[in-house]
Amino acid sequence: MKLTINPVKKLRGTLSVPGDKSISHRAVMLGALARGITEVDHFLMGEDCLATVACFKAMGVPIEGPVAGRLRVHGVGLQGLREPADVLDAGNSGTTTRLLMGILAGQPFCSVITGDQSLRGRPMARVTGPLAEMGAVFLGRDHNNLLPMAVRGGRLKPIHYQSPVASAQIKSAILLAGLYAEGETSVTEPTRSRDHTERMLQAFGADIRVSGNTVTLKGFPELKGLKITVPGDISSAAFLMVAAAILPGSEVTLQGVGMNPTRDGLLDVLKQMGAGVEIINERQQGGEPVADIKISGGKLQSTKIAGPLIPRLIDEIPVLAVAAAYAEGTTEIRDAAELKVKESNRIATVARELKKFGVDIEELPDGLVIRGGKSLTGTTCQSYGDHRIAMAMAVAGLGAKGQTVIEGAQCIPVSFPGFNDALKLLSVE
Ligand code: S3P
């Protein structure tokens, strides 16, 4: 599918973005492992989260919906999952796969997970390694690194894992396996990654504590179902925020966006680059901070993005590279080698596609250098099946001269169904 983007003068208006992808996945998973009903509102109807729902339905969890963002999970308890009769299909979703592997590691049955072409090329040894140490048995290609992966779980022993990378998927997989280990399981990260699993486990009643970069969980808790209203996804809002920031005269308000401090690095960077960023109506929603965000566009300046900031905006780097292309001066992005193992190699795909617009951009082993400020010319882009590359290039096209076509745009609903409608609604031609 092709998405055609015509340049616009500016963006104006107010809207709310779809529910947070990370939180939606976790609501289904913990709802399934709890006792009682978990009611979820503003659930992300994106393909990734629908894959998670399908996997848990296949393991015998009664789930009503999702219909229009509402979902009711009838929790089966920690020991209530059933052996799936067929291969579990995680589609494009790394979060589904890695978190599910943590849960499957604790199940006394055999299961097989696979996914689409992109997912089958992504590294899984980062979770199968520590989960095997806990006692689970894996069988997969490339020394248990690549899907399809067979898992034979069972009773686990707790570990204290020192993760070489800041990754919420690694941390969450081990913590979820830790639910099935007698005693205390802990994970220490070099920098803290997103903490939605910790927050939600606590809300469901688990015994979990955080000290510095270490999270510790006690095995076999009593998890109780609850009501969850999922905040708007800051990673989806990011595309509209950057679009507003690069188009002078824009003013866009996004309502009910998740403001978790492990996720809001984009706001710091946009402020630093000179965009107007106003945070309004801050509130708490089911253990997560939420606010309305007003972005005003203007002339942007270059910046440096590196170090502990990286995990706080890892999924926003493709669209931040677009902001940098529109900013005056040289922007450097470092310490972001993790981008190479996302839905595409995002260092390579961002550089390749932005070059087509005439952007002066250089690839580094752990980031990008973007010499911004030159005008962009519309072009034909590839998505590489990566939703965030497709949307980032669509944003680049809004401020370019002439039309831009995004090929392979059918991946956008992986995380942001309604992206094009949202752009149209805000566009002033
Ligand atoms: C996610 C964690 C991040 C992020 C992904 C969602 C999660 O991945 O890029 O989109 O929900 O836990 P890593 O854990 O690989 O950094």
Image (spheres, rainbow, N blue to C red):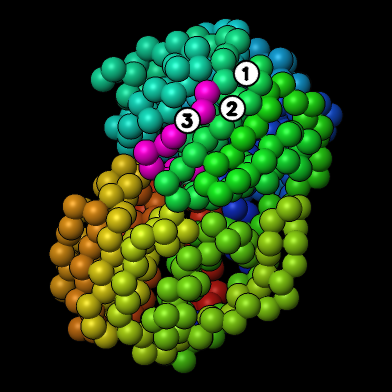
What residue is at 50 percent from the left and 72 percent from the top?
A: 267
Going by the numbered disc 2, the residue's amino acid type is: Thr
Asked if the residues shown at circle 2 and circle 1 are in contact, with their CB atoms under 8 angstroms apart, the answer is yes
Q: Is residue 423 part of the magenta span, yes or no?
A: no
Residue 41 vertical position relative to residue 11 in the rendered view, above or below: above
Residue 224: x and y, percent? 81, 32
**Secondary structure of residue under mark 3:** strand
Q: Earlier in the sequence, mark 3 or mark 1?
A: 3
Please give the range of residues in magenta. 159-168
Q: Quadrant of residue 223?
A: top right
Give the secondary structure at mark 1: loop
Residue furthest to the right in view is: 36
User: Residue at 54% of width from left, 57% of height from top?
Assistant: 262
Indicate which label's residue lies in the foreground, 3 or 1: 3
- Please state which amino acid type lies under the numbered disc 3: Tyr
Instruction: Name the residue that disc number 2 marks.
Output: 185
The residue sitting at 45% across, 50% down in the picture is 191
Is residue 171 positioned above or below 427 on the image?
A: above
Q: How many marks?
A: 3
**Residue highlighted by disc 3:** 161
Q: Are marks 2 and 3 in contact (CB under 8 Å)?
A: yes
Label 2 crowding class (10 Å Cα cut-off): few <14, some 14-19, many 20+?
Answer: many
Mark 1 lies on residue: 181
Q: CA distance from mark 2 to mark 3?
A: 8 Å
Could you tell which of marks 2 and 3 lies nearer the N-terminus?
3
Q: Position of residue 236 (x, y in %)?
A: 51, 60
Where is residue 333? Give x, y as percent. Answer: 28, 64
Question: Which quadrant holds residue 225?
Answer: top right
Q: CA distance from mark 2 to mark 1?
A: 7 Å
